[in-house]
Amino acid sequence: MLRGRDRQRVAVDAVLDRARAGRGGVLVLHGEAGSGRTSLLRAARHAAADFTPDSRRTLLCVDDAHRLDLTWLLDVLPELEDEPVAVLVAADRPLPGLPGVEVDPLDHATSVRVLRDLLPGLPGELADDVARTACGNPLALVELARSLTSAQLGGVEPPPDVLPPGSTSRARLRARFDALTPDARRALGLVLVDDELDVDTLVRLPGLPVAAVQEAAALMDPRPLVRSTLVAELPLAERYEAHAALAESLPDGPRRTWHRAVLAAGPRDGQADALAEAAARARGRGDFAAAARDHQRAAALTTAPDLRARRLLSAAADHWRRGLPHRARTILREAVPLSDHAEPRALADLVRGGIEVGNGLPDVAARRLLRAAGELVGGNRGLAVTALGFAGEAAAVAGDHVLHAEIADLAVAWRTADEPAESRLTLDHLIGTAASYAGRHDEALPALRSVVELAERLPDAKSKVWGGHAAYVLGDAAKAHALADRGVTAARESGLTTLVPWALTYRALAALMVDQHELALTAAFEGVHAATAAGQHNAVADHLMVLALLAALRGDADTALHRIDAAADQVRQRGLGRSGTVGAWASTCVDLTRDRPADALRRMRTASVRGVHAGIRALAAPDIVEAAVRSGHPDTADRALHRYEKWAHSTGTASRVALSHRCRALISDGPGADEHFTEAIRLHQVGGTPLELAKTELFYANRLRRNRKPRQARELLHDAVHHFEHYEADHWADRARAELRATGEAAEGPTGSRVADLTPQQRQIAHLVAEGATNREVAERLFLSRRTVEHHLRNIFTRLDIRSRVELVKFLD
């Protein structure tokens, strides 16, 4: 579970420490060529600087051991057991009889850092593409970086997808290819010209021995860089021989059509049309991988430049939908120069804009999508409305409400009385959210209610997600969560992996609205992993900031700041106003937790983003009011509360109206405050928000104690402590206990309980530790600080009445 090279370094250090203690040991570091085996040996020699003749310690390093006969080592191992000798062996595969550890590839983030060290100023998209192409192989990463041309660095040409000629990595691949027997070369050639060819089909082809297939299997690497490099090395005659064999043996279908078309002389537009039709059918059933493949193949056979451009753009769109933005970008670079006509340019803007919403600059994406919408509206109105909707989404992600309002004005102008349901939903969502952001809530409500009503009827993922967002703005948490959940399901079932992280954002926020932290945590963690897999870096930042907010609302300042820091670079570099505003809100909560109300009050003004998201700022208003009251700025508190009350009362949501009453109580003096606190508590109970109920009880109890009503204060504080302990809100629980002591009652410490009463986060940590994870591993997995993990682990041991990790494993077994 250790990430990057940590697992190998820990294993190497263990062998060295064993030798320092006078015990011998051996370790095989195995991995593919270029994986960094030799570098690990070099690092081990540096770490073993104390292995000197006077110390009697010995380090033996053996590189490329797969080329040697090491039976002698097996013979002498028993003799090394009691000697200060460490033996480190590097090989391309595990060696029988010897303990070993695999040299893992570099993770994506580390690969990008290596590239930026090699080439300072490397554009972010290009670094991302090259890192993905290298697949974590350090040598390939370096050789690809060194091969970049000025045209590739400038974005004029696509990045390399093959290892450069003359490179060490390519020479090694070529040597392995040349060493194959003729039958094995033929088997490999078949796989290289058709990456969907499975082994069962391969062994059934006439004249191809099973032994040859087994021999070739060592080079049947699924990674695109290895495949594309071997394709480049495959002689032309062998390539055409493979196409001919598959054109003869495959059943009728798009794959057979492609192989036959490759062999055909003259124009092949008929086969291109057949492949395009197959791509359309694949897209219709949600198989975007097949759709992208057949669109690309159709484009390769198409004579007319405009039609070829459209088919390439369709392939790019399919790659984008399946969560491969780097492949979509590469195809776009090929497609755009083919045509000067408006429609292909608009389609290119639509695809590129969609990519940029997920992992680029959202303000640039918004304007690109807006341009695409304008060019498409005359010929393809449905697609134009979709482009307009995502332009609005991009503007919201950027926090650019001026641009969002411009887009919404266009939506008003476009909307017709007989608007089809799907486009009406999109346009009403733009109109309703823009009015809400501007504080025109009476105007927003009918549009947003229309969106929710339509979303319940329409089956597509996009409609479900926007419907969920509309329900969230309206304050209907149950409906918001249900629609977002159905959006996740619809996106997965239709193969639209790029929409999954987006839908999970609203599922997490809907759960957060009613203090369902376990559901919110699950959705946000799932969102981080889904966004990472789909190449949606902006969505990763979204979910990290939601995770930070969850921690901040519980008073866990260290965890909140750790998660904010993990997303900060992305937010700053890409101008993610929405994520940045969530982070500023979380930071506001942290400052309040640390008794720094003046700093908390400045957070929304100094957020280091290009725009502050109005919707998120509205949600943060209760914490801004608290900060203003505590720092002696009643006018600021009044202004913030006025805007919040207008929104909360327009929707009538019990949980939000409860917060408005709590804020009014904090501002008020005299008996009016008691009435507001009492109504807030009632509405918290109606709205089902126990964590916020506990905070309101704490604030009210403090006022009651100061007004010499300790008995009433104690009743509230006992309930507050119970709720805070349930949410593992230790900071707030400690504050409530301190307040209890101030009323004259000796507050008890945290109550002990068994595993069923562990909090969701405690259960996560307990199970990870029981599986063998170290504190550092748990921290990385859950985006926590190590100190926070140690704190939670102590609480887990206390609750379960155990004293060690071994006991924890037995307890959970």
Image (cartoon, rainbow, N blue to C red):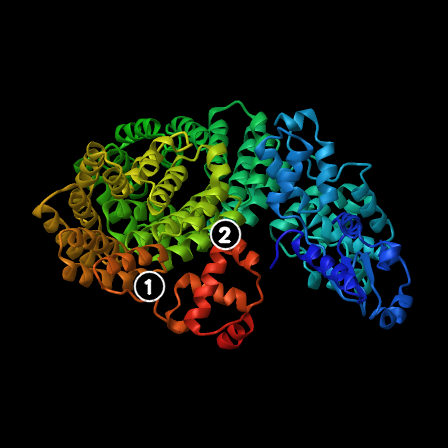
Q: Is residue 799 left or right of residue 722?
A: right
Task: Give the amino acid at mark 1.
Answer: His
Q: Is residue 415 left or right of residue 712?
A: right
- Residue 65, compared with residue 441, is above or below; it is below
Task: Identify the residue at horizontal 52%, vertical 64% (top origin).
Answer: 768
Q: CA distance from mark 2 to mark 1?
A: 21 Å
The residue closer to the viewer here, 743 or 716, is 743
- Residue 462, compared with residue 369, is above or below; it is below
The residue closer to the viewer here, 444 or 545, is 545
Residue 103 image offset from top left, x and y in percent: 72, 55
Q: Earlier in the sequence, mark 2 or mark 1?
A: 1
Q: Secondary structure at mark 1?
A: helix
Q: Is residue 671 visible?
A: yes
Q: Which residue is mark 2?
A: 785
Within 10 Å of disc 1 (Cα), the crowding (few <14, some 14-19, many 20+) is: some
Q: Secondary structure at mark 2?
A: loop
- The image quarter in which residue 579 lies: top left
Residue 747 image offset from top left, x and y in percent: 28, 64
Residue 130 image offset from top left, x and y in percent: 65, 38
The residue closer to the viewer here, 655 or 357, is 655
Mark on residue 726? 1
- Dot 2 and dot 1 residues touching (CB under 8 Å): no
